[in-house]
Amino acid sequence: MRILHHLPLSPACRKVRLALHEKRIPFELRAERIWERREEFLAMNPAGTVPVLEEENGLVVADSYAICEYLDEAYPDTPLLGRTHAERAEVRRLVAWFDDKFTREVTRNLYFEKQLKRQLGRGNPDAGALRAGYANLRPHIEYLGWLAETRAWLAGNQLSLADLAAAAHLSCLDYIGDIDWSLNDAMKDWYARVKSRPAFRPILADRVSGLTPPAHYADLDF
């Protein structure tokens, strides 16, 4: 069986899970406590990070973007990176926006500080980082709202990896109660459409020990 090594509240892992589900590619989830630095896991990915996709033929692909590029090339049905050069460029731009800029300015300051930092043994949340994360979140929400208002989907007329990347980040922040959905109706409506897709159901079913999501987390109508 194809195996995806992951962490339940990792945006990068959730993006890959969504891509696999949208493409209807069967796989088995295997939680990897990266802070334990298992030798067998490090042999697959010396960087010690998730996600890591282990194919049935033994091929190992690490890094969420590398995995998604591989999936779109190896399983071209239901393309997620766009069809034309222009579409693919815009999808890649927005995926980089969320996986790099949003991660650096928001996710790392909120999800990492509040949830992952203790698991990695790096102490308590930094109050300054939390303030920065909340301050940075608002302009990102406004930009998401603008994209959702002016396009059918974030990168254009078709659902793409850009939507999955953005939704993966928001779902993790929503789980820890850090998204105020009243700030932008267009963004909220777009996210409701994404999380109503069958591919999102396993994500909404995730539960982390000791951490309960808000009541609306798995509600498709908020």
Image (cartoon, rainbow, N blue to C red):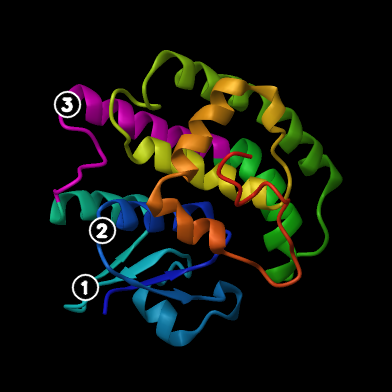
Q: CA–CA distance between discs 2 and 1?
A: 19 Å
Q: Secondary structure at mark 1?
A: loop
> Up-down: is 190 above or below 200?
above
Image point (59%, 80%), residue name: 36
Q: Is 207 above or below relative to 159? A: below
Instruction: Residue type at mark 1: give it.
Output: Leu
**Quarter that holds the N terminus:** bottom left
Q: Quarter holding the C terminus?
A: top right
Residue under label 3 = 85
Point 41% across, 46% down: residue: 197
Of the numbered discs 2 and 1, the one sitting upstream in the chain is 2
Q: Residue furthest front?
A: 221
* Residue 96 at x, y percent in the picture: 41, 36
x, y percent for residue 136: 68, 29
CB contact under 8 Å: marks 3 and 1: no
- Residue 18 visible (yes or no): yes
Chain-order first, disc 3 or disc 1:
1
